[in-house]
Amino acid sequence: MSGRTVLAVETSRSTYTVTVARAGTLRTDSTSRFDADFDGISGLVRRVLAAAGCPVAEVDAIAVNAGPGNLTSVRAGLSYVNGLAFATGIAVHHASTLEVLAFLAADVAAGRPVLAAHPARGAQSPVSYLGLFTPGAAPELWFGPVEQAVERLAGITELVVAGANRRFALEGLDGPALHDSGVDAPTSEGLAAMLEQGRLRAADGPVAPVTEESAPFAGAA
């Protein structure tokens, strides 16, 4: 880690995670919005900052996942981050859920393409937010059933899969040899690491949620 103090917020699911990266150490905690004692993202952030011995005034940058995912959760996280940035002037940096999944799978991928598959219709549905990340090429992002990914895999002989809906690929996607990354969901630790490696985009205003109405997902499946 660099000398920056980073607050990372991940809320693409009903379970929220927050990480403070400071002086080479990480402090992480999580909460579910369905917990009886849920006190919101602000409560979770306060706990993690306190555990790290870090007042909010010492945070240098915020990293956030802009989605897609559970829209209620994504909007809650972005509302908190945008409000905190407005109140404090702390710079915000963001990535999509699919980018975080691909980043987390990079060690297993070892240069091979990664297919990220994040649920779009619940845990039992193969309909997903999908991203194909091929080294040296721009990512391809789309929305639909996992099995339709085969149409985009021409010429790929090996593929690493990531995300909660990777199981649909492992169970029934024909074509390349498939490798399970073991990556189930984006993490706040991953966001913090991406920021330190310059893999996030700096926000020039409030960060808007990525949804199925956003390009390139709009109009698909």
Image: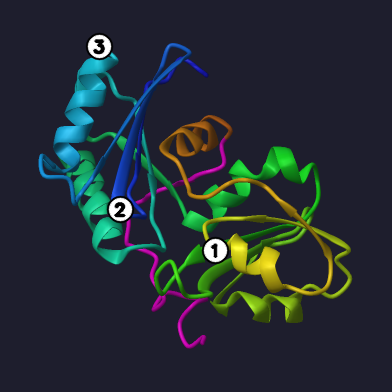
Secondary element under disc 2, as helix, strand or loop, is loop
Q: Which residue in the protein does label 3 denote?
A: 53
For residue 88, say whether it is visible. Answer: no
Q: Which region shows up in magenta?
A: 198-221
Residue 118, how many percent across, how many down? 50, 62
Q: Earlier in the sequence, mark 3 or mark 2?
A: 3
For residue 204, say whether it is visible. Answer: yes
Query: Relative to residue 158, is residue 172 drawn left or right?
Result: left
Q: What type is the residue that disc 3 sits on?
A: Gly
Residue 70, how many percent across, how many down? 33, 63
Q: Is residue 217 found inside the magenta-colored segment of the image? A: yes
Q: Which corner quadrant of the image does residue 67 belong to? A: bottom left
Whole-number angstrom distance, CA of label 1 to CA of label 3: 37 Å
Q: Which residue in the protein does label 1 denote?
A: 165
Q: Residue at x 34, y 25 (%)?
A: 60
Confirm or deny contact between disc 1 and disc 3 (CB under 8 A).
Answer: no
Measured along the vertical axis of the image, is residue 103 above or below residue 89?
below
Report the predominant secondary structure element of the magenta stretch.
loop
